[in-house]
Structure formats: C-alpha cells, structure tokens
Image (cartoon, rainbow, N blue to C red):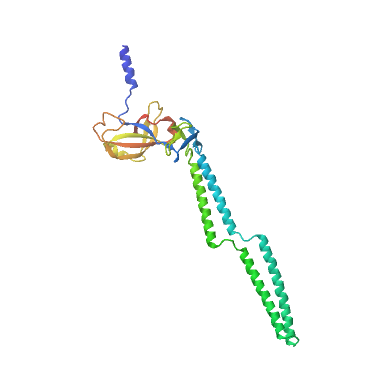
C-alpha cells in the first residue's frame, strides 16, 4: 500500500506538459564589461547578485600611467596655447605708446613747417627772400611729412601680430594637435574604469581586487531586465504560424500564472534534434529554433537556464 501511494505521488509530481506546449529554456543576453587596456584591478564596486543602477561605477583598474599621460598632454596644450597667444599679440603697450608720442611730435613738426612754408612763399612773392631760402623751407616741410608717414607705418606694424601667417598657421596646428592629445589621454583614462550602462543584475564577477586583468577580458557580466528570452523548438508543421510578434505564454515550475512573451526570432535553418532539449516527438522530425522576448517586468521571476513550457496564447 505504501509503495502504491508513493508511486501515485511521484507520478503527480512529474506532471507532463500539455500537448500544445513546447519545451524550452530561458536564456539571458549578458552585458560584459571590460577595459581595452590591461591593468591591476584596483576597485570592484559590485558583487555577484547585486543590482546596480545605470551610471553607477562597476570597477576601476590602476591608472597611474594614464593620469601622468593626461597631465603631460595638458601641459603641452598650455605651452602651445601660450606660443600662439604670443604670436597673435601685438608689441608691448609701452612700445606702442612711444610710437604714438613720436607720431604726435612728427605731426606737430609738420604743421609748424607747413606754416613756415606758407610765410616764406608770401615773402618770396614780395621779393624779400631768395628762392634758395624758399626751397630750404619747402624741403624741411616735406621731410616732416615723410616722418609722419613713417611713424604711422611703424604704429600700424606694431599693432599687427608678431608672427607671420605661416608661423601663426603652424602654431594653430600645434594647438589643435595638443587638444587632440588631451582628448585621447582623457579617453584612455576613462577606459580604465567602467560604469553600468543600464540598470541590471550583476550576474557574475570574474576577478577580485588586486588581480591582473588582461586587456579586453570581461570583468563583470550584467543581466538587464529586458535581456531575457525563451528558446524552444517547434516542428516543421507549426513553422508557418510562428511569426515575429506572435503572443505566447511561458509556464514554469512554481510560476503562479503564465508569463506573456512575444516571438522575436524564427530560425530559417532546420535541425534534427535540439542541442539541449529532447522529446519523444522530435527525435526523427525537423524542428526549428524560435526565440520569444519576455517583458522586463517579469525578469525577477525567471533565471537563465531555467526550463519552461511555451504555448500559444
């Protein structure tokens, strides 16, 4: 009697899925966080099983070399900008003030010589002075006018940048190159640490603090809520009804109610036997892989690798 009761309970616990359901399993699309540069793991901000918010730090590698390179690039940029500023600047203010004073003196002398020339011309017409005296005064006035033009030219030149066009162009190129070097150094420094791109569950961590991490090796894997999907196989006869967007129901052990899902992918290649799941109906028939995307709100109810049954809604 006890053996019969035990057999009945065992059969009840091994309830078979409905005829219209397909066996499948849950798969997660993990976000692997890594650094393109090698280094010692200096800080690991999360642990396996934690939930991390978007933008929160996840890990940081040792970055002394990158910080030094960033400082060097910043100093080179300052030097290039100072050189360009110096070439773009005019002469010093005291030199310009001196030229302005010289121009004032030259203009005063020219005005005085112009007045003298006018007087000498009247005297020459009256026969009071010789022509040689008139020529002498006229020459002095022309010299004063030339002096005014000379000082004006010197003042214009003093206000121009010290560097020539070619020098200015070269200096501007050096500044642009220095800015690019700073941006590159900033990027390299940023790559030695990582933050969570989305809110997610920390699925696993592959290193502990103090370990050496090879460039490109994942350090943390995240599982965002919307990255769960059900994978199952349908026979060839059901293939025509499996369209992207088709509503399905996911059933699992311990789930109080079916979970909604939608078909997101249907394979165009047939397989004889699923690589993971086996059933008596599919051993000798062609089957096709189908993936159904689950809603992010039910991510806490299912886990990657969990077996499920899938049926049409």
Place of residue 279 in the rendered image (x, y in percent of width and height, measured from the top left)? 28, 29
Camera-side residue: 116 or 262?
A: 116
Determine whether, in the image, residue 308 is placed left or right of residue 171: left
Name above or below for residue 51 compared with residue 163: above
Count of all numbered marks drawn on residues in the image? 0
- Which quadrant would residue 276 be assigned to in this image? top left
- Which quadrant would residue 16 be assigned to in this image? top left
Q: Is residue 66 visible in this depiction of the protein?
A: yes
Place of residue 134 in the rendered image (x, y in percent of width and height, measured from the top left)? 71, 83
Name above or below for residue 278 compared with residue 244: above
Q: Residue at x 66, y 72 (%)?
A: 147
Quadrant including the N terminus: top left
Tell which residue pokes out farthest to the top in this image.
1
Tell which residue pokes out farthest to the bottom in this image.
127
Quadrant including the C terminus: top left
Q: Residue at x 53, y 45 (%)?
A: 70
Q: Residue at x 51, y 53 (%)?
A: 176
Name above or below for residue 155 compared with residue 231: below
Q: Residue at x 52, y 59 (%)?
A: 169
Camera-side residue: 313 or 100?
A: 100
Camera-side residue: 232 or 40?
A: 40
Q: Is residue 313 visible in this depiction of the protein?
A: no
Tell which residue pokes out farthest to the right in this image.
128
Determine whether, in the image, residue 117 is placed left or right of residue 15: right
Name above or below for residue 9 compared with residue 95: above
Place of residue 307 in the rendered image (x, y in percent of width and height, measured from the top left)? 36, 29
Determine whether, in the image, residue 220 is placed left or right of residue 3: right
- Which quadrant would residue 284 be assigned to in this image? top left
Place of residue 300 in the rendered image (x, y in percent of width and height, measured from the top left)? 44, 31
């Amino acid at each position: 009697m006890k053996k019969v009761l035990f057999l009945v309970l065992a059969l009840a616990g091994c309830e078979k899925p409905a005829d219209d359901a397909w066996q499948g399993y849950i798969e997660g699309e993990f976000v692997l966080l890594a650094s393109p540069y090698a280094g010692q793991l200096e800080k690991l901000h999360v642990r396996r099983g934690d939930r991390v918010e978007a933008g929160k730090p996840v890990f940081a590698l040792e970055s002394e070399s990158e910080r030094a390179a960033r400082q060097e690039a910043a100093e080179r940029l300052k030097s290039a900008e100072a050189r360009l500023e110096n070439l773009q600047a005019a002469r010093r203010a005291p030199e310009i003030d001196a030229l302005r004073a010289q121009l004032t003196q030259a203009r005063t002398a020219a005005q005085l010589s112009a007045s003298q020339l006018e007087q000498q011309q009247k005297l020459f017409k009256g026969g009071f002075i010789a022509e040689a005296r008139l020529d002498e005064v006229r020459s002095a006035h022309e010299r004063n006018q030339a002096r005014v033009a000379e000082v004006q030219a010197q003042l214009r030149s003093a206000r121009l940048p010290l560097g020539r066009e070619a020098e200015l162009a070269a200096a501007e190129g050096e500044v642009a190159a220095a800015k690019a070097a700073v941006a590159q150094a900033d990027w390299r420094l940023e790559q030695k640490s990582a933050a969570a791109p989305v809110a997610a569950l920390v699925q696993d961590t592959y290193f502990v603090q103090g370990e050496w991490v090879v460039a490109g090796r994942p350090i943390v894997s995240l599982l965002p809520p919307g990255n769960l999907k059900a994978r199952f196989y349908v026979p060839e006869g059901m293939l025509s009804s499996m369209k992207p967007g088709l509503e399905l129901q996911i059933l699992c052990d311990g789930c109080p109610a079916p979970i909604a899902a939608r078909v997101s992918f249907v394979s165009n290649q047939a397989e004889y036997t699923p690589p993971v799941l086996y059933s008596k109906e599919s051993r000798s028939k062609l089957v096709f892989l189908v993936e159904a995307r689950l809603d992010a709100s039910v991510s806490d109810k299912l886990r990657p690798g969990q077996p499920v049954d899938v049926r049409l809604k």
